Amino acid sequence: MADYNPQKLEEEISRYWDKNDIKQKVRERTEGNEPFFLIDGPPYLNGSPHVGHMQGKVLKDVMLRFKQMQGYDVWDQAGFDTHGLPNELATEEHLGIENKNEIGDKISAEEFITECRKRATSAKDEWQGVMNDLAVWQDFENPYMTYDSNYIETAWWLLKKTHNQDLLYEAGKPIHWCPRCQTSLSGYEVTDEYQQVSDIAVYVKFPIENSDEKLVIWTTTPWTIPSNMAVFVHPEFEYAKVDVDGETLIIAEQLLGSVMETAGYEEEEYNVKEIVKGEELESLKYETPFLEEVPKQKELDKEEGVHLVHTSTELVTLEDGTGLVHAATGHGPEDYEETRPLGLPVFSPLDGEGYYTEEAGELQGKNVLEIDPEIVEKLQEKELLLHHEDYHHEYPHCWRCKTELIYRAADQWFIKNEKIKERMLEENQDVDWIPESTQKRFHNFVQESPDWCISRQNYWGIPIPIWVNDETGNIQVIGSFEELEEKAGGLPENFDPHKHVVDDITWEGEEGGTYRRVPDIFDVWYDSGIAPFASLHYPFEEQPFEDMWPMDFITEASDQIRGWFYHLMFAGILGFDEKPYEKILFQGYVLDAEGEKMSKSVGNVVDPAEQVEKFGADLPRFYQLRLAPPWEQKNYDEEEIQNEIYRLFSVYWNTKEFYQTYVDEDVSKPEELRKEDEWVLSRINSITAEAEDLMEDCLFYKLTRKIETFLLQDLSRWYVKIVRERIKTGDQAAAWTLRTVLEEVNALLAPFAPYMAEKVYQDFEGELKSVHMEEYPKPDEGAIDDELEENMDLTREIIEKSIKIRDENQYNLRWPARRMVLSLEEEWEEKLKDFEPLIKQMANVKKIEYGQVSSELIAEPDYSSIGPKFGSDADKVAEKVRMLDEEQIKQATETGEIEVDGYDITGEDIQVSRESGESVDSKVFKQGEIFLDLEMNEEIKEDAFVNELIRSIQQKRKETGLEVEDTITLSIKGDIEPVREREQLVGQRINISEIEYENADYENKGEENFKGFNVEFSFSNPVN
Ligand SMILES: [Zn+2]
């Protein structure tokens, strides 16, 4: 028997698969059947696959293999995300570009994009290699790539469709902006990256025109004050006009105390002279602090509503600050929204790198992230600063480059979300989320989601197909390459629809002017959101899309609620007014063995390629699936693979090897099966009966654990132990049963451990070319017998208890026990009858009896009672108590009294105990009690002796290096009679041609001495 060697096994199977094109053949078997549509959440190709990818890919592979076995024609195209900033940043670094503005200047856009494209696929081969080793059979030969022209054309098609639904608009809104990456970020890109920063908080006085009163505002972003457009108060709040240092300040009354204290004033230093309601302050005109330095402010000052006090119940709270809010329409989304009805201009004098532009006058060229101290100084000079202090708070940073984000208004393209949102919420009701609770999480996220800002100011992405007339401002959205060709009167040869090419394509408008493309590219989430149809070049090619839509199953990490799951849904509604997926499985994060996040700098990263090198693919695959529900966080611990999973697979392997060693011809279903055969068939079919549902519900951890328990507890430690001798002696029923069970469990294992299952299938000479072409096993319902399983449980318990008794009495299992007595309720006695042979065999007992073990009731006098009661006669009575027989004792305990020779003896006068032979021991269990009689009579001694002798000979055979099938001639001398009487047994257990007594003296020698019996034995080298 060869040991289980995963690397060797997998290499061999891998070669077989490749040589015989098995993957393709498995695919062909179900071609044309009902489709099963799965799309890859495209991983970003900027690095090697990590252990989280491994989990995701294995989950997909398991589901696909399962569906394939069920007969579905699976759509399993892999995909890669290729566009986006991480690539751009790496490319910039690679090319030595420090600033994005250098593109087009120092290096052409074409060169830059060509480099990005190269980088986008650099890890593709490595990915394919690792996935191939992991036996992930997704179609990696023809993956969809988001940079493909076809993919881009579908992206354009959808935008045009969106435009036709009147959902596309451009607006100069303040949005989160990274000055390093020079691009906008969506809200969901910001939520994870809050870090502690230290800013300056300022209390600033805004003088009211033609008055000596001043509004006091509070802000933690002093750099936004030069862009101030308005001040908001709450119409209902009360505001104090307070005299201090010869000025009159206006501050919300409730906050007055804390503001003055913060500013360093004692109560007696200020004086409230009037309280007014917020609404009374409305429309007061004030002088914005940077009117002189920022000439644009002077211009805007003349516009209606600018630099006036307005009221808002939304913007103004009493949580902190002064109850007066400084509004910079270009630097805060709430400021922006709240000032829309007022028609205030959006003022954002910042460039993409976060420097003030010419519009900011004197401030031009200064960086907003550095200017706060200077602003404070200027306010001080102007005597407008009431107070300033350091302020620590959580502030959003760019998730890619960790730069502090700013709010900046820039012209961006948006898709209106209001109507789409309603449909998303409706459709979400019909999505099967695993676990179910995530449906609500998705619902909540959708409910709060804003319009989708789809534009980004980068190079490497899908160009937004909007062309704007430079004279009239009219726009045209282009929905296909053909349409673009018509407009432009031709396309360049080898048309590449990326920015460097499409930016040069223009045409004259019929109304005059020239149509030029907006410079932006799409948010990469738009790329991945359209994957289910863009990967198929819908609607430009004849294809299976309509039959397959929507996707049957997708699975990604839980952070994709606001990522891929959301944008797929959005794109699905935009394109088809329908949910794009039926079922979503969540993946929890994979942490290291100690529960720490894996990170390169800590050095605790688990590399899938290394795992495969160490353990092969089956073990890590099975391990990850069995570890926990897919959606839960997991600690990846290699030790468990080594210790538990390797052992499990070895047991499985050895069981198969055992079968192959002793059964060499085909076995057919026998007429009659024994109880243990029926039982193990019932067990495996019980598991099979649940398997399909567990797979559908992605409860892989439950099914793998059931398989594990079956292999270890039921099969290896029980069934095989029972039938070992039957198999060795050619019992057809046992052989057929073991084979049937192994074949069935192998089919259940196939999706989880594709290599091992294939190898076992081959060793069993499966009918098809591959186990993966087999149908998923269906249970034989007739074989399932719950009562039988229950009875076997009891049988097992009895046998285990008997072995415990032996252990406690140091009575070896090789020595037969004289009898076992079972004290059970009648119902159980009946049920156990059929299992008696099994109990006798496994517990090694000669006889099974039911009832109580024969024992005696014994009565002892209780002097504390009879002493006072009988006085001087006590000793005499005590003697009579000792003489009571069993009947009398029972009477005394049951009726409470008995008369003996004129003495009235009651139950209190005696203590009753039960006494049995010294060699009987017992154990109690749920259904009753077991007694085991361990007294050795002569026959048992001889039996035990022969068993010990057999063991010694077998031990010696092993030491000599003999194989199981080797036949020997055996010679023994000494106390040979017990052996002679048990020759048949010896012959069954040891492979011998004959036994000689007293005659020969062979090469291999040994002796056995047991309880007075002594023999010497010797045996020949193999004679076969
Ligand atoms: Zn950044």
Image (cartoon, helix red, strand yellow):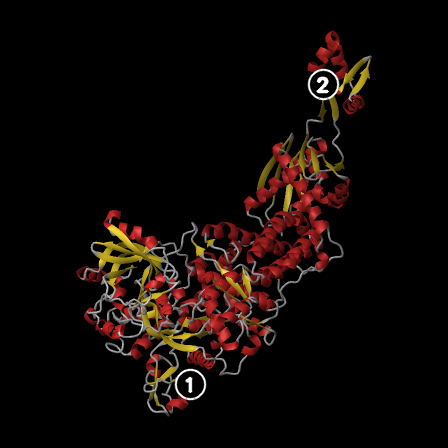
- CB-based contact (under 8 Å), mark 2 and mark 1: no
Relative to 11, is 171 on the left or the right?
Answer: left
Along the horizontal axis of the image, is 559 left or right of 695? Answer: left
Residue marked by disc 2: 860
Q: Which residue is mark 1?
A: 481
Confirm if mark 1 falls within 8 A of ligand 1.
no
The numbered dot on residue 939 is: none
Residue drawn at the location 77% of the way across and 16% of the way down = 905
Q: Quadrant of ligand 1?
A: bottom left
Question: Which sits earlier in the primary sequence, circle 2 or circle 1?
Answer: 1
Rendered location of residue 106, percent (x, y): 23, 76
Nearest the eye: 783 or 479: 479
Q: Amino acid at mark 2?
A: Glu
Q: Compared to 875, does 486 lie above or below?
A: below
User: What is the crowding at mark 1: few (fewer than 14 residues within 10 Å), some, or many (at least 20)?
Assistant: many
Instruction: Determine the image quadrant of residue 428.
Output: bottom right
Residue 114 x, y percent position in the rendering? 33, 77
At mark 2, the secondary structure is strand
Picture residue at 73% right of the left edge, 12% below the top: 869
Near mark 2 (Cα within 10 A), the count class, few <14, some 14-19 or many ≥20, is some
Going by the numbered disc 1, the residue's amino acid type is: Phe
Residue 404 image-quadrant placement: bottom left
Residue 599, image quadrant: bottom left
Q: Is residue 595 visible?
A: yes
Which residue is depicted at the point 53% across and 53% down? 3
